Amino acid sequence: MADSNGFVLHPLASDGTTDVPYTAADYRMAVNSIQAAPDGTPFGGLSGIRAGSPSPLVSCDGTTVTIAAHAGWICAFGRMYSYAITRDYELRIPTSTGSYKIALTADDKAAGHGDGEKLSATAYPATTPDSQIPGMVIARIDAGVASDTALTLQTDMLITAPSLDRLKTVSGIEGQRAALADGTEYALRNGVWVPRTQFSQSGTWEGTVTKENTWYGYNFGIVHIELDTNMGNTDYEIFAQPMQGEVISWVTVKSRSVDGFDLRATMAGMDSMDLRIFWEVRAA
């Protein structure tokens, strides 16, 4: 249940018993890690607010800071926490002329931090490193002016509709993707469902990937893909899939530019790998 501030840190603490053979930590690891946007680790995730949250999220009037009701995820102590602020919340800052970071922080006694399980909103001096804050900085206040800093995490769920007429009855967030039964793809732009540009470019990369570094126990190398056509100012999405038979590997996007992109190819326990990668680029 929500506390007196309307805050919920989910899941709440619970102990395993014969009737409930799991703990909150078990639930958090299995469920919160799946819900959150991956950060490249097995169970960690990105701290951020749920798409659809109010903007601006934080406002300031004199020494009163208001955080709008919203939900999101916090990564702290190497663990993922989902949370909700069920109504607007106010906190005070020392002066209206100073600089502060507004953060949502987690207490988790079971993890050895704090004296309970709760969510708090705290104002830190702006000079405080984010790494010393057990939670997520959602805004910065400078001389009474608030600027949101939290990431907004999209749900990348694809909607499938039987017809365009049915799709037009669906409301969603900006950028939401959808497909009709015939495979035609749409995106929600300024409240209107518009056709997405189909495949811009695609191809297959084939060669030997060599180890460049080790990341959480896995070796990885970098594959650079040059595009045939400069993408200019077009925002584009990348889809890449290894075609590797029995060898375990996967690829993720490392960086991108107007004329190409880099893929991080991960290899389980190998220093090099002959790899074929199928890739597609679509306008977002």
Image (cartoon, helix red, strand yellow):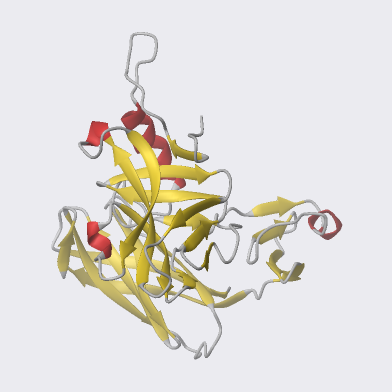
Residue 94 vs residue 58, the one in the foreground:
94
Q: Is residue 98 above or below residue 168?
A: below
Quarter occupied by residue 274: bottom left
Percent of width and height locating residue 200: 57, 79
Left or right for 196, reference 128: right
Percent of width and height locating residue 30: 38, 35
Q: Is residue 241 above or below residue 82?
A: below
> Can residue 189 be seen from the camera position used here?
yes
Quarter occupied by residue 16: top left
Left or right for 142, reference 154: left
Percent of width and height locating residue 46: 38, 56
- Outermost residue to the top: 18
Q: Residue at x 75, y 58 (%)?
A: 182
Q: Residue at x 60, y 60 (%)?
A: 54
Quadrant containing the C terminus is bottom right
Q: Residue at x 36, y 72 (%)?
A: 99
Quarter occupied by residue 28: top left
Residue 183 vs residue 95, the one in the foreground:
95
